[in-house]
Amino acid sequence: MFTINIENMIKYILFTASLLFVIQFTEAQIAVKGETVYTVTGETIKNGIVLIRDGKITKVGSASKVKIPNGFKIYEGKVVTPGLVDAHATVGFSGIYNQKSDQMQLDKSSPIQPELRAIDAYNPQESLVAFLNSNGITTVHTGHGPGAPISGQTFVAKTVGKTIEDVKLDDATMLAMTMGGSVHSNFKTPGTVAKEMAMLRSELIKAQEYQKKSSNSDASKRPARNLKMETLVMLLEGKLKALITANSSNSIMTAIRLAKEFNLKLVLDGASESYLLIDEIKAANAEVVLHPTKARGYGDMKNMSWETAGILANVGVPVAIQSGYEPYVPKTRVILFEAAIAVANGLSFNDGLKSITINAAKIIGQDNRIGSLEKGKDGDVVIFDGDPFEYLTTVTTVITNGELSYEVKK
Amino acid sequence: MKVRISFILLFLCSLFFLNSQNTPIAYQGALIYPINGNPIENGTLLVQNGKIIAVGSNVNIPQNAIVNDVSGKVIMPGLIDTHSHLGNGSGGDRSGALHPEVRLLDALNPMAVDLMKARSGGITTLNIMPGSGHLMSGQTVYIKNKLGKVIEDLTICNNVSSEICGGMKMANGTNSIRDKPFPGTRAKSAALVRELFIKAQDYQKKLDAGKKDASKMPTRDLKMEALVQILERKRIVHFHTHRHDDVLTAIRISKEFGFKIVLHHVSEAWKVADEIAEAKVPVSLIFIDSPGGKMEAVDLDPKSAPFLEKAGVDVAFHTDDPITDSRLFLRSAAIGVREGMSKQKALEGLTLAGARMLELDDRIGSLEKGKDADFIILSGDPLSVYTHVEETWIEGQKVYDRKNKTDKAFAVGGYQVYPETTTHVHD
């Protein structure tokens, strides 16, 4: 009924393999042409060209200076930007179905769980990840969500790839922490911000002790391995940044106080009322990953403003805009749309673009690889058919790691 | 506190001006989208006594008119939100799945600050609905977004006790599936609704008999009275539905009982656009920034908008605020166009199509002589992200002016601008 013809099968395999090789070969060399090319870190180029070979950008310049070598596949459009970088998402953890089985961003068994690794939970094949890629987001800083004093680790991933190993740019980037807000509805204790702060300080003091004992020259006097303590030591040593979700002004100040006491690298997340605390945030050297502009103003976000990004940028606080965590619909936000509303409300066009590219890349420690169109950086490029922030504009082409990852259906 | 005081002052000022609209006001030089016709370059809009007197490129302006130069601006009708939850109201409770007798107008706070979101977004008329966690969560209310103190200041009907002042909210799919006394499956959901309407048909027969013979008149039943209004096609059913099969179930039930229906949300409309067109049922769409968040919205796709237009379905939009933000309602039309809708139909979806779905198109939805003077002045193209609503006018009264610092705060937010925490259980 069903016989296998070995010869045909070998032919088929060889043919497929050669086809794959050809695709790989052609995709490995890409030229992107744009009427306007926003490099973000360098000059904006009229009639610009970006050359990509083997996944990396090899040349960026104007068409009059950069020749497209033979064999390069050409993609073109009106506006070209770097692949967009989402400074804080929970995509790949909080899945599209919003059922218990696909919500992995928060474990409520205990309020302080720094040992929860992002790489053990991220789903690179989650359909919302591909959805973000089709909107030009080529990199996400994602992981455990808000809602616990320490909910777990975050990491950085490209939005194309099958496995963690394919997509990860690091193993752990920050510890996801929340000051106030939803913490008190998720846990019986801490039930107040003061209690939360006391718990965090106690744990960090324990970690300081653990750190001291671990460095004892006498190996026999070192403590037994403790995953929680090991992770908190990384936080104390600045190997992990403290991503503290804090929205009300008092929560923001409490986060700053905690960071100061333990010399933590502070990234203020959400930061709804940051416009009230410009000097304090500057003095604390805190980085800011602002709430989605269109976030709903519930609870401790009730005083949020669409003008905050512009206010921060205008006083010299580099701001990144996040997609954040959404418990309902939309299950993920799209930073391009969020930045657009900020740009329509006081953030300059250039700062808007930075908020979803280079500023985000710097905060997540990947600006050597992504966030701008520069020689040597990853071949992550987006082509738009107009002003990226305009409602009517469409993402037409996305190139991730030097390969076509999305093209609009015509 | 400062904001609140200013809000009250603004409100009092508006009351003062309420009766001073007998002086005609002309707005000259704008690009006018009348919606019922082609855009008018360098047009004039003339209003008086809360009504539109004239619209066009060649309008005779009375000598006593106040003339406002609005050249470079865009004027279009006030926006109509066919589905909103602003105003801190709620409908039926958890005692049952069907609450035809419950009126949202008994719960709406006419002074709710969040109504200012809609004013700053250019929304002048709203269908305020109870939530979707019930098969039938109650009667909706159609309001003008005027600055008022009591519900009667806002309702479009004149007498809330004797008139029909809104539609009926119904829902199918997953939101209303929960523990007893709620249904546990989709089929049970449909059965419960059909049983109720069959009772209403019986009641209707008794009413008819009672009209001939008073002794046969049934005792008053608030539930049945509202349902009979639906059967008589006097009260429109606004039906929350997402998945393609749920959409067709809603249509099937509406045909069985012959009631008027507007489909709301309709995430999977793109899959059944032809069937919706064939049923001659209008659709009010919402655009959510990503699919999912609930099982029935996983295949949500904004291309539903052009699919429906192509199939010949009347399409309006809604905010479902707080699901999407009233301040960004114009964006809905832009997304429709981005996905392939015509600009004309997309702008109609914010205005005249919504008016038709609320059966208020004789009064609102377009800028034409005799209609209510509900209009908005925009800084630019209605479909641009950079465009702001500069002024919102309802029946000749200005209810929002971006030049005013307090008003602008309602458009962008900030410290204690919206002190109330809106809670809308949508599940």
Image (cartoon, coloured by chain):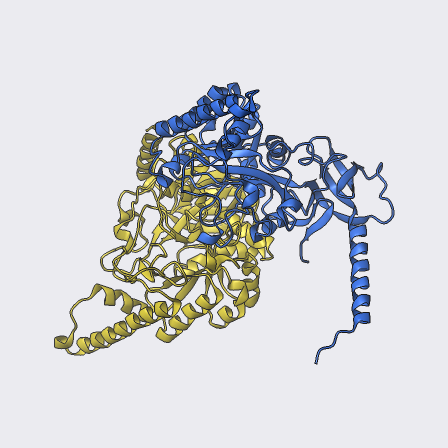
Chain colours: A blue, B yellow
Quadrant in which residue B100 is drawn? bottom left
Residue, far front: A220
Residue A232 picture location, percent across and down: 50, 29
Residue B318 picture location, percent across and down: 45, 53
User: In the rendered image of this protein, does residue B43 appear above or below residue A37?
Assistant: below
Residue B43 picture location, percent across and down: 54, 47
Is residue B276 visible in the rendered image? The answer is yes
User: In the rendered image of this protein, does residue A84 appear above or below residue A212?
Assistant: below
Residue B350 picture location, percent across and down: 48, 53
User: In the rendered image of this protein, does residue B66 appear above or below residue A282?
Assistant: below
Q: Is residue B16 left or right of residue A410?
A: left
Residue that appears at 51% across and 33% down:
A175
Q: Nearer the viewer, residue B281 or A340?
A: A340
Residue, far left: B215
Residue that appears at 35% across and 67% down:
B189
Q: Nearer the viewer, residue B396 or B385?
A: B385
Q: Nearer the viewer, residue A189 or A140?
A: A189
Residue, far bottom: A1
- Which part of the image, by quadrant, shows the N terminus of chain B? top left
Q: Is residue B112 left or right of residue B367?
A: left
Is residue B39 visible in the rendered image? The answer is no
